Amino acid sequence: MDNITHSVVGLGIGALIDRSVAPEPEPAAQRTRTRMLLTVCCLASNFPDLDLVLTRLVEAPLGYLLHHRGHTHTLVAGVAEIAVLLGLVWLLWPAARALLRSSPRARSAALGAACAGLLLHVTMDGLNVYGVHPFWPFDARWLYGDLVFIVEPVFWIAFGVPLAAMVSRRVPRALLLALLAAVPVGVTFAGFLQWGSLAGLLALGAVLGWVARTSVRTSARSRHALAAGLAASLGFVALQAVALHAARATAAQAVARLDPGERLLDTAMSAYPANPLCWSFVTVAADPAHGGYHLRRGLLSVAPQVSGVDACPVPIAGAATLPDSADGARLAWQRDARQSLAQLRDLQKNNCHFDAWMRFARAPSLDAGSATDVRWSRFGDRNFSTIDYAALAAQPCPQPVPDWGYPRADLLR
């Protein structure tokens, strides 16, 4: 997820923890605890992305592909990250240090906020098509949620509205709420959101605002609104999971109908923001008849009677250019490419740069001297994953290369 989302969710969970623990006896101590828990949870919810400084260990694109969402996004490293974060709070924040010395409940809440923030980061990153490997070194495989878009406005509204409602001064509170409404409206006019998605976001914001105003006490208001935002977020993820199951089944049926001789290995699904109906996808299938593997890229709608695939926002994954004649408004193909399995295996064996790249690539598309993971672009287009392996062949092998599992080990065997 993007760091704005990580920050908003971290602040929201920090505030929820603070309001779920008995208050400190002194108002000054309570104010310090509130600031400390929001700060700790927000920082912990961003801490794993410090691995961006490690991306310079290896030249692009391998540095980013192999070291971002790397070791700092694992549960083992998370223990050290929590210790470092709480240690910095202790050393650099005298008021927080005094509170932690005197209040057992503040110590427990701070530890809970740090753990929650870190787990939130890794879990939320695992919800999208990029993936994580949180159980390294015990399991080095990439795990993909394929559930939510990498920038998800549902989370902004779910936690942003309750947080804005907590602001005591009227003008700053009104400005924050106006910003939360204006951003979805702007991206809808830009074509990234459907109007139905915008209506759902505004309705969610209105409900959370109503919850924040109907409780009697201030602390109860914010706690109830934050809990409602958390429930809405979990409900949205559950809805996405149901839609993902239907989308995978639709894609698998389409591939089987087009070529019954192929064996579907993987379907990388990419969600649309605030939209459980629309999905873009890339299928990877073993193609024994042609001695290779077959990549197909397409778009689909899990409820074409509500919104056909041609109504899915074009700026996200392109237009539905080749409708599937057997599926009508449900599915459209963008393009496909048959790839040489012998070439893939030869490159992995004899080009150490390509071998390192294969520790990331889930949908490897080979071109003349370059390769691209087509999860993020159409065939023939370059994206942040593109590697010019031919130009790198004569250069020293990249180091250090983490021992992540090969996403396409099923092709390399």
Image: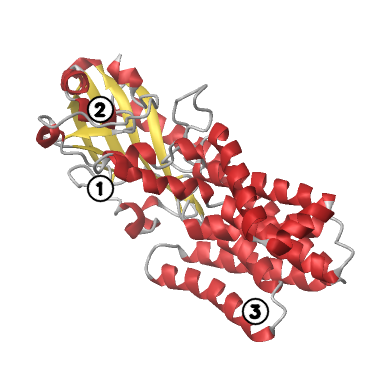
Marks 2 and 3 sit apart, C-alpha to C-alpha, by 53 Å
Which residue bears the numbered disc 2? 294
Tag 2 secondary structure? strand
The picture places residue 68, in percent across and down from the top left corner, at 39, 42
Position of residue 211 relative to residue 176, above or below, is above
Marks 2 and 1 sit apart, C-alpha to C-alpha, by 20 Å
The extreme bottom residue here reads 171
The picture places residue 201, in percent across and down from the top left corner, at 57, 64
Which residue bears the numbered disc 3? 173
The structure's colour scheme is secondary structure
Whether residue 332 sits left or right of residue 247 in the image: it is left
Query: Counting residues from the N terminus, which is met first, the one under dot 2 or under dot 3?
Result: 3
Which residue bears the numbered disc 1? 383
Alpha-carbon neighbours of circle 2 within 10 Å: few (<14), some, or many (≥20)? Answer: many
Position of residue 291 relative to residue 367, above or below, is above
Residue 331 visible somewhere in the drawing = no
Residue at image location 34% in from the left, 18% down from the top: 410
29 vs 133, nearest the viewer: 29
Residue at image location 53% in from the left, 57% down from the top: 5
* Tag 3: amino acid: Arg
- Whether tag 1 and tag 3 are in contact, CB under 8 A, the answer is no
227 vs 289, nearest the viewer: 227
Whether residue 42 sits left or right of residue 344 in the image: it is right
Query: Counting residues from the N terminus, which is met first, the one under dot 1 or under dot 3?
Result: 3
Tag 1 secondary structure? loop
The picture places residue 143, in percent across and down from the top left corner, at 48, 32
Residue at image location 39% in from the left, 55% down from the top: 312
The image quadrant where one finds the C terminus is: top left
Q: Quadrant of residue 21?
A: bottom right
